[in-house]
Amino acid sequence: MKLSNALLCTLREVPAEAEIQSHKLMLRAGMMRKLASGVYSFMPMGLRVLKNIEQIVREEMDRAGAQEFLGSALLPAELWRESGRWDIMGPEMFRLRDRNDRDFCLGPTHEEIFTDIARNEIKSYKQLPLNLYQIQTKYRDERRPRFGVMRSREFIMKDAYSFDKDNEGLDVSYNKMYTAYHDIFKRCGLEAKCVEADSGAMGGSGSAEFMIKSEIGEDEIAFCTACDYAANMEKAPAAAEMLEKEELKELRKIETPNIRTIDELVIFFSTTSKKFAKTLIYKVDEKLVAVMVRGDREVNEVKVINAVGGAVDFQMADAEAVFTATDAAVGFAGPIGIKVDYLFIDNEVSNMNNIIVGANDTGYHYENANYGRDFEGIVGDFRKAVEGDKCPKCGKVITIARGIEVGHIFKLGTKYSKAMGANFIDENGESKPLIMGCYGIGINRTMAAIIEQNNDENGIIWPVSVAPYKVIVIPAVTKDAQQMKIANELYESLKFLGIDVLLDDREERAGVKFKDADLIGIPIRITVGKKINEGSIEFKLRQCPDIELIAIESAIERVKQELKKNNIWR
């Protein structure tokens, strides 16, 4: 491609709307343009990167034995009602009706559609195992689109679904996808780590996320400092700190006027936050749910949602709901006599002695409350893990870091096949539900994640595998006939070999061309300048500061060598 004919509009200034590096650079490098909040058009240069990522995904999925399929993005409500998710998906689902008043949605995910295909096409165990995948646009009406394509309302996803006759087969399919995902992200130049994750609205018995560490990540990840354990904070178990046991003391009601917060109570009682258990009240759909954690801990709301079996609407209770549960103002809730549908008690609280809790009476707290004697509830792990907690795998210390999710794999089991009647006939002639797995990769998000890990003050540094073009040839002075002749010859030779190459034949200063080449992130830059009189040209790799002088006739071979290093040229 000659840049004089290309639609390339780079920006020197950082767009005001952009907050993170990938968003800034995708706009500045002309990779995409904003159409509406959370909706972007991909420009020719950005589309080439997307297509390269898609091709890597296709090759590894095909290598793992999956078959590509393409479903509709316009999905009938009937399938979602069969699975029970039409209401569960909530306001993030784009819903519409056709002229016949029939309900549809724009697909946010495709479990129901693949299950429908399977129940109509798979009849016998002889057709199993089977893995189908697609690369397609998804739609989610995000409450707060942000960070460019990291969280957008329209995005491209590779989603795959495996179908097996038993759980042993599912394990095999799951492990194949696990391996394929590692290979995909490695080929994309990403350092991705697989972490345990919560299955969320997708359901199923187990799941894992592929994360890259990033300060701008929306997810918190618990990493062990000693072993390979890692888990999303939504999933990470929080081991209870075992405090010294005390002799049980008499329960006492203490007047605490206008004292509501843990910090205020610590001062009032002249003790530490570890002597308190706070009771937080939530509205979960139509239910009131109270959760007790130690005074210095935070509730893990995902664990609470899972404990009640899922929720469409989950929010902190307002003052009116708190009064309904406690007969008291906000700040005085406690477990003794509370009126809720569920009282969840964190493991840590159940092992504490003589704790201070709200008295469900405005202006009062209880001192020396004890689980089992003064109150009871459902005991479990309901708090967030914190830095310094013990690793559940090896017992060493965990650390917390932020991360970006680029892939997610689920063991769905029979959640959808049972609900939708997707059955097969086994070896004994019996009808059984298909065992399913689900495997997703965000293509746009992967593109942004690559930029987050590969950039400098000058712009993007694309890994060769996904770069929009592998080489850019720059004649320093386009009015110099000899420079243009050699530049064109190199350009045509590389094109003939099937190498993606740009020729910057624009009538711009060399410095402008260099800045654009660095901003766009082309891996290899060849500059044809005044040194051609000595038989030399400049050869530079984007990720390296050094510029080499090489012989003109060795340029093509030098490009091949670099591509071979990156497994692009064989």
Image (spheres, rainbow, N blue to C red):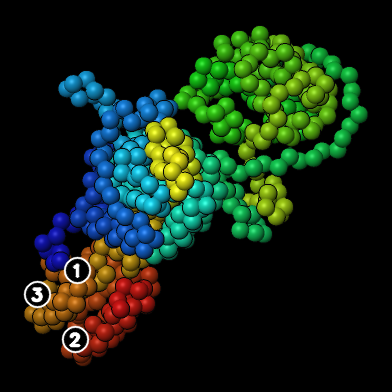
Which comes sooner in the sequence, label 2 or label 3? 3
Please tell me whether mark 2 sits on a helix, a strand or a loop: helix
Real-space CA distance between mark 2 and mark 1, rounded to the nearest whole angstrom: 20 Å
Q: Is residue 248 visible?
A: yes
Pointer 1: residues within 10 angstroms few (<14), some, or many (20+)? many
Question: Is residue 440 visible in the rendered structure shown here?
Answer: no
Q: Quadrant of the N terminus?
A: bottom left
Amino acid type, callout 1: Leu
Q: Residue, x 13% and y 80% (percent of image)?
A: 489
Q: Position of residue 420 (x, y in %)?
A: 39, 33
141 vs 523: above or below: above
SS for dot 3: loop
Identity, as a three-letter code, of the amino acid under mark 3? Lys
Residue lying at 28% horizontally and 80% vertically, measured from the top left: 560
Horizontally, is 276 left or right of 118 in the view?
right
Q: Which residue is mark 2?
A: 532
Label 1 sits on a secondary structure element that is strand
The three-letter amino acid code for the residue at tag 2 is Ile
- Which residue, given by chain and number where applicable, does mark 3 sit on? 479
- Classify 10 Å Cα crowding around label 3: few (below 14), some (14-19), many (20 and above): few
**Where the C terminus falls, by quadrant?**
bottom left
Residue nearest the observer in this picture, 520 or 287:
287
**Horizontal side, residue 543 vs residue 483: left or right:** right
Marks 1 and 3, how far apart at CA: 18 Å
The residue lying toward the viewer, choosing from 143 and 268, is 143
Residue 55: where, in percent of width, then height? 29, 60
- The residue that label 1 is drawn on is 502
